[in-house]
């Protein structure tokens, strides 16, 4: 099961607190994932979903709000990647009229009530009405990429009015989404894991939110380890590169004038470097008698470098 389905399954199992919250959630599903058809001279409202728990949720919402049992059917899908489609149909004319009237839309999905008035009703009513609407909007139009791959949650709307209405709710709650238009569809989306967590928390998908946080924590840990490994690797490479240059300089001096002609402190350091080409300056310093600091080693190496460069000027690279 995908992460999207996990979220939808989780919120589909929530208790329906009241008829008004049930109606608000149902209205969002109606606006994002329903069609209206004519059968036997009567209008029907049809919902469809691949998720069995979502189909049960829609059935329970309709039954809770209107004390009506919609028709539920299952259609197999020829696509081997999909299990099939659950269809929930309201074929009672009175229930159809009531649902459309209560949600403020007509048979064509157009608003019959000013969206600002509908929004004000959500703001004025007691209870968590915003969350109910967003829950329904996600059930009808939402999806989320597996968080182990990337952070991306979106809701796709076919009508600009529904897009604007949902955006206004999200803005009011302080979880402002990113916006996009994709093939004449209107998309609200998030690519920030913290905002996705906030959204999941609002709609009550607590388990999914915690799973997202766990994935994020593991990603952050891996990134931190990788950064440390890369940093350590870079430091090792830098140490080896520096050591090789120092070894080449010392070998050039040995070849042309002999290390025995170096001052005693520099001669000891030169031999230590030739014997330990992989060690850092700090570690080389600990081998000296007596031990000296990293800065002390660096100072003496610079003197060896000066002798090398003087020889280069006098003798060349030969």
Image (spheres, rainbow, N blue to C red):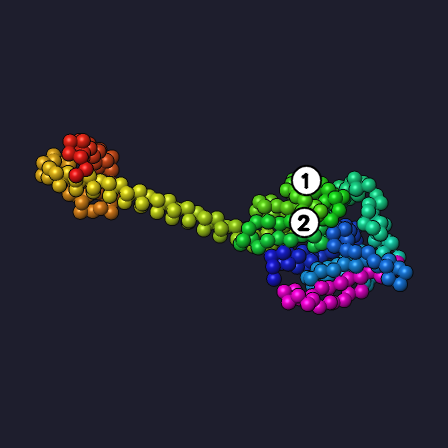
- Image quadrant for the C terminus? top left
Q: Residue at x 22, y 40 (%)?
A: 246
Q: CA distance from mark 1 to mark 2?
A: 15 Å
Task: Work out whether 3 lies above or below 170.
Answer: below
User: Where residue 223 appears, x then y in whole percent?
Assistant: 45, 48
Res. 155 mark: 2
- Nearer the observer, 275 or 294: 275
- Label whose residue precedes the other's in the sequence (1 or 2): 2
Residue 209, magenta (yes or no): no
Where on the picture, by quarter, is residue 250? top left
Quick one: SS at disc 2? Answer: strand
Q: Seen in the image, is 131 located left or right of residue 231?
A: right
Q: Residue at x 19, y 37 (%)?
A: 317
Res. 171 mark: 1
User: Bounds of the magenta span?
Assistant: 71-93
Residue 43 in view, yes or no: yes
């Amino acid at each position: 099961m995908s992460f999207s389905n996990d979220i939808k399954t989780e919120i589909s199992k929530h208790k329906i607190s009241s008829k008004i919250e049930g109606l608000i959630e149902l209205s969002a599903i109606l606006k994002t994932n329903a069609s209206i058809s004519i059968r036997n001279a009567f209008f029907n409202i049809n919902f469809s979903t691949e998720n069995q728990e979502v189909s049960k949720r829609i059935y329970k919402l309709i039954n809770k709000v209107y004390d009506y049992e919609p028709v539920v059917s299952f259609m197999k899908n020829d696509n081997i990647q999909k299990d099939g489609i659950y269809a929930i149909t309201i074929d009672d004319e009175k229930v159809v009229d009531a649902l459309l009237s209560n949600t403020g839309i007509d048979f064509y999905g157009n608003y019959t009530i000013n969206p600002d008035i509908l929004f004000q009703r959500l703001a004025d009513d007691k209870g968590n009405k915003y969350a109910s609407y967003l829950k329904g909007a996600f059930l009808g139009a939402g999806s989320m990429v597996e968080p182990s791959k990337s952070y991306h949650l979106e809701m796709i709307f076919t009508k600009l009015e529904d897009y604007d209405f949902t955006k206004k709710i999200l803005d009011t709650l302080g979880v402002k989404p990113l916006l996009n238009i994709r093939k004449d569809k209107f998309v609200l989306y998030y690519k920030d894991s913290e905002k996705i967590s906030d959204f999941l928390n609002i709609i009550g998908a607590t388990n999914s939110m915690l799973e997202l946080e766990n994935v994020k924590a593991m990603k952050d840990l891996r990134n931190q380890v990788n950064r440390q490994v890369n940093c350590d690797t870079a430091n090792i490479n830098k140490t080896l590169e520096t050591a090789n240059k120092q070894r080449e300089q010392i070998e050039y001096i040995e070849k042309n004038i002999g290390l025995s002609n170096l001052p005693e402190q520099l001669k000891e350091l030169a031999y230590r470097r030739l014997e330990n080409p992989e060690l850092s300056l700090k570690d080389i310093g600990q081998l000296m008698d007596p031990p000296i600091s990293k800065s002390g080693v660096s100072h003496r190496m610079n003197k060896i470098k000066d002798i090398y460069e003087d020889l280069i000027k006098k003798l060349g690279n030969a």
